[in-house]
Image (cartoon, helix red, strand yellow):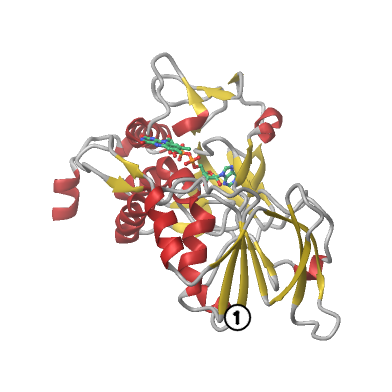
Amino acid sequence: MVTKIMNDKIYDISIIGGGPAGMFAAYFARLRGLNVSLIESLPKLGGQPETLYAQKHIYDVAALPKISGTDLIKQLTDQLSILDCDKYLNTSVSSIDRKDNLWQLTTNNETIQTKAIIVAIGNGSFQPRKLTFDYAPELEDKNIEYFVNSIDGFKDKDVLVAGGGDSAVDWAIDLSKVAKHTSLIHRRNRYRAMESSVKKLDDSTVEQLNPYIIKNVDFNSDNHNKIDVTLKMIKTNDIKVITTDKLLVNYGFVSDSKILRDWNINLEGPFIKVSQEMETNLPNVFAIGDIVTYPGKLQLIAMAFAEGPIAVTKALRNLYPEKDYFEHSTSIFEK
Ligand SMILES: Cc1cc2nc3c(=O)[nH]c(=O)nc-3n(C[C@H](O)[C@H](O)[C@H](O)COP(=O)(O)OP(=O)(O)OC[C@H]3O[C@@H](n4cnc5c(N)ncnc54)[C@H](O)[C@@H]3O)c2cc1C
């Protein structure tokens, strides 16, 4: 893919992946006075806690006895906003190339230039699991959505939510508060969501359509702003066509870390091999979080939080040896 270098900006560190590992590493690098970009393929930061288990609770992050996935990401976002860095959302890095001692990151948008890279891509790039049949591409983002970018887009609309996990159930409940009418379609009679969320769903105005699968989506012939969603009841020939404004599909996410194979980076299985200082085999390319392996590695947020400062400190030593002195944050903020 050929992308243009849109500006002359050269970052000290570009962090690929805006999950917990990347977010904290970005903050720590800013704390050390570095010029940082944080690149995330999804429309929002947060990685697995925000995308896969927003409402579940985490009990093993130091000093936080119990925190939901989404609240942890809110805390990280608030912390990052204190020193802020350049964030590139909806931006997926496809390749990294070395030129004139700099790294060039090719993305689906622009090319980003940087002196060092921290790869924090977790299990790889998340993509929403999509409807499996063909539909008119114009419907996507207008009538068919895979993310809620703005709740206002659902205000006073007829809405169908598809899926049976936490995200689908929670969105159906939340959207029913602003939408004209909300239905939830699931292919089973039981949801895979938390009991408390299912109870809220039962107490809400959401119409529950199960066990149904979606067979087709097309423009409504009378009103092109609406869509006809064809549903089939599981194990029967019962077909239902519902005319609606919006279909929000929440079938979960698929991840892919295969791109790494083209980056000439040493792997062990699907993971990046790193040294004690989080170095990869490539100059000034570090890796942290779920994507790395080393003796004793655990795929835990607590470990990802520790790996960021190690990688940033080594990068700082390589790039600016004269700045290589240690200071606690208490002293840095006093200045
Ligand atoms: C259900 C569940 C429960 C869990 N519970 C706990 C728990 O209780 N305690 C705990 O410590 N851990 C828990 N974990 C694990 C924890 O969430 C992970 O260890 C943590 O999210 C790893 O963070 P990360 O930043 O390395 O990766 P991720 O959170 O996976 O974030 C990586 C980010 O990189 C982005 N990305 C990937 N490829 C690219 C690319 N090419 N370009 C741009 N962006 C890219 C992705 O979209 C993603 O946002 C749980 C995980 C799951 C699935």
Up/down of 304 relative to 127, above or below: above
What residue is at 67 percent from the left and 26 percent from the top? 264
Say if residue 203 shows up in the picture. Answer: yes
Q: Is mark 1 within 8 Å of ligand 1?
A: no
What residue is at 52 percent from the left and 36 percent from the top? 122
Name the quadrant containing residue 179: bottom right
**Amino acid type of the residue that numbered disc 1 sits on in the rendered structure:** Lys
Pinpoint residue 147: horizontal percent, then vertical percent. 58, 61
Q: Which image quadrant: the C terminus?
A: bottom left
What residue is at 52 percent from the left and 69 percent from the top? 206
| Residue identifier under label 1 | 157
Q: Residue furthest top?
A: 295
What residue is at 56 percent from the left and 35 percent from the top? 123
- Comparing 242 with 167, the one in front is 242
Name the quadrant containing residue 153: bottom right
Relative to 165, is 58 on the left or the right?
left
Q: Residues within 10 Å of mark 1 (few under 14, many from 20)?
A: some
Pinpoint residue 184: horizontal percent, then vertical percent. 59, 62
Say if residue 288 shows up in the picture. Answer: no
Up/down of 317 relative to 94, above or below: above
Relative to 76, is 149 on the left or the right?
right
Relative to 90, is 35 on the left or the right?
left
Pinpoint residue 33: horizontal percent, then vertical percent. 33, 50
Up/down of 59 relative to 197, above or below: above
Pinpoint residue 296: horizontal percent, then vertical percent. 38, 16
- Comparing 305 with 299, the one in front is 299
